[in-house]
Image: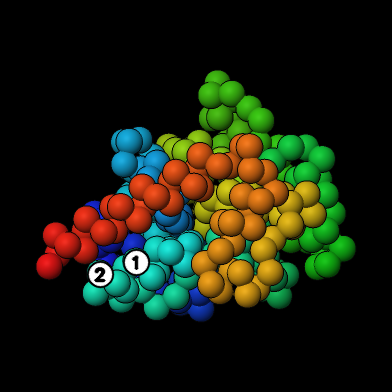
Amino acid sequence: MRIKFLNIPIDAITMKDTINLVEKTIVAKKQIHHTVVNASKIILMQKDAELEKSVIEADIINADGQAVVWAANLLGLNLPERVSGIDLMESLVEMSYYKRYKCYFLGARENIVQKLVAIYIEKYSEDIIAGFRNGYFNEQEESDIARKISESGANILFVAITSPKKEIFLNKYKDQLKNINFIMGVGGSFDVISGKIKRAPIFMQRIGLEWFYRFLQEPKRLWKRYLLGNIKFIWLVIKEYFNSK
């Protein structure tokens, strides 16, 4: 079931529902293009038509942001829970180990993606690794990168590149990536899992302050995205609330 939140479709499903859909898709040898939205991305979508198109055309759109869940429920919509991209990625990597699937990791700096892969090999097995590549490339290289990923034998592709580049890349090349059953963007997840960036404690995640913990680690780079972005998001929700009344 999908809801319409600030004119953006979001799937009203749980983490468990999402994982089950991924597994069914792999078994059926089909493809799902997955994406997530949070307050920051929703603000970016207001002024970036290509990003908006890339998100809306995805097969599954999860709410990765507690603020989105709360705001949707305030507007009388039913979002059962937050489906965090990093938590979904971790669950799918674990599933790949038990189900003998293979994953490809695209994104971050070379040392970060190498460390990420080493962590997963130690934790699980090198059998789950179809390949990896850093996230630094130009537009002329994209098609060749997509081709190599498609030929890697991967069932799942994780792309850890900033918005809107990752969303646009996946939407642009998903037909070329048709051999991959599940494709998703995971933002800064490689940085977190590799240990470069610390993730917020569980209690901060539950009360919707994970963004604030992230902001404290890089305030100069992230103040505009989070502080100004959150104010804009709250304003959009307030307008929608009174319009709906």
173 shown above or below 212: above
Residue at image coords 39%, 78%:
80
Graded by Cα atoms within 10 Å as few (under 14), some (14 to 19) or many (20 or more), the crowding at tag 1 reads: many
Q: Is residue 147 above or below residue 234?
A: above
User: Residue 99's x, y, as percent?
Assistant: 66, 73
Mark 2 and mark 1: Cα distance apart in space: 6 Å
Q: Residues within 10 Å of mark 2 (few under 14, many from 20)?
A: some
Relative height, residue 57 to residue 88 (above, below): above
Q: Which residue is more in the foreground, 62 or 196? A: 196
Q: Which residue is mark 1?
A: 71
Spot occupied by residue 234 in the image (x, y as percentages of width and height):
35, 56
The residue sitting at 48% across, 62% down in the picture is: 65
Question: How many marks are shown on the rendered structure?
Answer: 2
Q: Residue furthest right?
A: 122
Residue 238: which quarter of the image? bottom left
Tag 2 residue: 75
Q: Residue at x 56, y 64 (%)?
A: 209
Residue 156 shows up from this direction:
no
Check residue 34 in the rendering and tell me which mark sits there, or answer none: none
Q: Are marks 2 and 1 in contact (CB under 8 Å)?
A: yes
Q: Is residue 78 visible?
A: yes
- What is the basis of the colouring in this image? rainbow
- Asked whether 58 or 193 is in front, the reply is 193
Amino acid of disc 2 = Leu
Image quadrant holding the C terminus, namely bottom left
Residue type for callout 1: Ala
> In the rendering, at what x and y percent does residue 165 appear?
50, 36
Is label 2 in a helix, a strand or a loop? Answer: loop
Q: Residue at x 61, y 37 (%)?
A: 221
Up-down relation of residue 91 to residue 146 (above or below): below
- For label 1, the SS is helix
